[in-house]
Image (tube, rainbow, N blue to C red):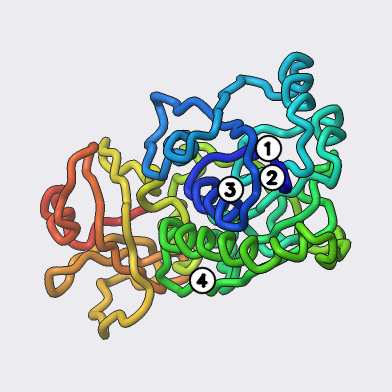
Amino acid sequence: MTRAVVFAYHNVGARCLRVLLAHGVDVALVVTHQDSPTENIWFERVADVAAAYGIPTITPEDPNVPEIVEGIAELNPDFFFSFYYRLMLGPALLAVPKRGAYNMHGSLLPKYRGRVPVNWAIIHGETETGATLHRMVEKPDAGEIAAQQAVPILPDDTAGDVFTKTTLAAEMALNGVLPALLAGTAPHVMPDLKQGGYFGGRKAEDGRIDWIQPAKDVHNLIRAVAPPYPGAFFDLQGHRITVLGSLSLGLPPLEIAPETGKPALFSQDGRLFARCGDGRVVRITSLELDGQPLNPAELPGRLGGNPIPLI
């Protein structure tokens, strides 16, 4: 029986762990994370899945310390699998599995290497993303590709919508290639690292809306950080306004307020719209005013004007 050690977190980790078990892989150990008290844990806990199947679990702050590496090496694994595990595995760990280490990444590599690939893909207006199983090497997201599965990004999809799709894509990619991988016959293709690029993590402040930007860029930012992420935001008249949802499709004909082209908020027919720097609009479907939910169409009345200039 093939033996593996699994490094995993989040929904992708939970689903892919189940795929390994369904194919009869002996998962000797799951390495996961302690949940952060400051993070919105909206996803499935890998530790719960492991517990349900009686698999030992550890949550080291650093899996690369010598005692952890030695303990994992004693399990004599054939494979490592990393499924949305948040820490890098160093050379000493990667040298442990006899048949290699594989990572599941949430993009179509070599595009969007690095952190939060789903969010970055939406911010850049991509119409497609997916999941990639690749061999782990010391450089992140740079090893040979063993499997990929693409999914569409629709114009009004949020990061939550796309993450759900990429979770299924990860499950499909792993499930499809795993028999060949275990048999030693899976194809491996070296990616052209000149394509795509490497992206870092994002902070809450990166969600600040710049209304001078074109409407498509504003909409992409809003949906890229929509719940379960913290939401895009801006400050106006001493208030913090958090935009939790927007639409770009199917907007009705609008009687645009005077001074067309200058960014402004305005309500019409019981709906709230934002005119952006290029004169085009997005519809705001959900927001909070100073942390409290508010019907978007009521915002101009609360702030004393319709339209409300944004610059």
The residue carrying mark 4 is 153
Task: Evaluate if marks 4 and 3 touch, with contact meaning CB atoms under 8 Å apart.
Answer: no
Residue 118 place in picture, x, y as percent:
56, 56
User: Measuring 53% from the left and 74% from the top, which residue is drawn there?
Assistant: 152
N-terminal of the pair, mark 1 or mark 3, is: 1
Mark 2 residue element: strand
Label 4 to label 3, Cα distance in Å? 15 Å
User: Measuring 35% from the left and 50% from the top, which residue is drawn there?
Assistant: 227
**Dot 1 alpha-carbon crowd within 10 angstroms: few under 14, some 14 to 19, many 20 or more:** many
Question: Which one is in front, 50 or 203?
Answer: 50
Mark 1 residue element: strand
Task: Evaluate if marks 2 and 1 touch, with contact meaning CB atoms under 8 Å apart.
Answer: yes
Question: Which one is in front, 75 or 156?
Answer: 75
User: Measuring 18% from the left and 40% from the top, which residue is drawn there?
Assistant: 292
Label 2 to label 1, Cα distance in Å? 7 Å
**307 left or right of 229 in image:** left
Q: Nearer the viewer, mark 1 or mark 3?
A: 1
N-terminal of the pair, mark 2 or mark 1, is: 1
The residue carrying mark 1 is 5
Question: Which one is in front, 127 or 6?
Answer: 6
Mark 3 residue element: loop
Mark 4 residue element: loop
The residue carrying mark 3 is 116
Q: What number is the disc on residue 81?
A: 2
